[in-house]
Image (spheres, rainbow, N blue to C red):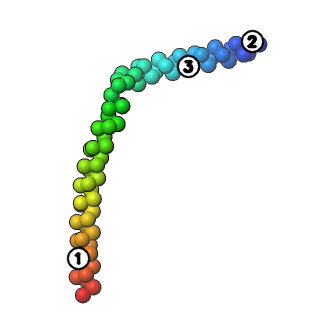
Amino acid sequence: MFILILISLSLGLAAWLLFIWAVKSGQFDDIERPKYRMLDDDDIKDKTEDKNKDKNKDKNKDKDKDKKSTSS
């Protein structure tokens, strides 16, 4: 029975220390912003993906031209 008390106290202390660490490291600084950031990131990712697709298309066209010119 004494061992169970020590185990429960040590688990409680570990949980408390983990909570204190989380607060000090800033995990609870802004709990409202992430739900809005999730919506904002889609627009930025879409724009960068579109730019990357355009760049890849241009690169593929250049490669195709190079292949055709070397095969002739």
Q: Nearer the viewer, residue 18 or 41?
A: 41
Dot 1 crowding, Cα within 10 Å, few <14, some 14–19, many 20+: few
**Mark pair 3, 2: CA separation:** 20 Å
Q: Residue at x 28, y 49 (%)?
A: 46
Report the mark closest to the observer, 3 or 2.
3
Q: Nearer the viewer, residue 70 or 29?
A: 29
Residue behind mark 1? 65
Dot 3 crowding, Cα within 10 Å, few <14, some 14–19, many 20+: few
Q: Residue at x 37, y 24 (%)?
A: 31
Q: Which callout, 1 or 3, points at the residue further toward the start of the chain?
A: 3
Q: Which callout, 3 or 2, points at the residue further toward the start of the chain?
A: 2
Q: Quadrant of residue 27?
A: top left
Q: Amino acid at mark 1?
A: Lys
Q: Amino acid at mark 2?
A: Phe
Residue behind mark 2? 2
Q: Position of residue 8 (x, y in %)?
A: 66, 16
Q: Residue at x 22, y 66 (%)?
A: 58
Q: Amino acid at mark 3?
A: Ala
Residue 59 versus residue 32 in the image, above or below: below
Report the mark closest to the observer, 2 or 1.
1
Quarter containing the C terminus: bottom left
Q: Position of residue 12 (x, y in %)?
A: 59, 16
Q: Quadrant of residue 53?
A: bottom left
Residue behind mark 3? 15
Q: Which mark is residue 14?
A: none
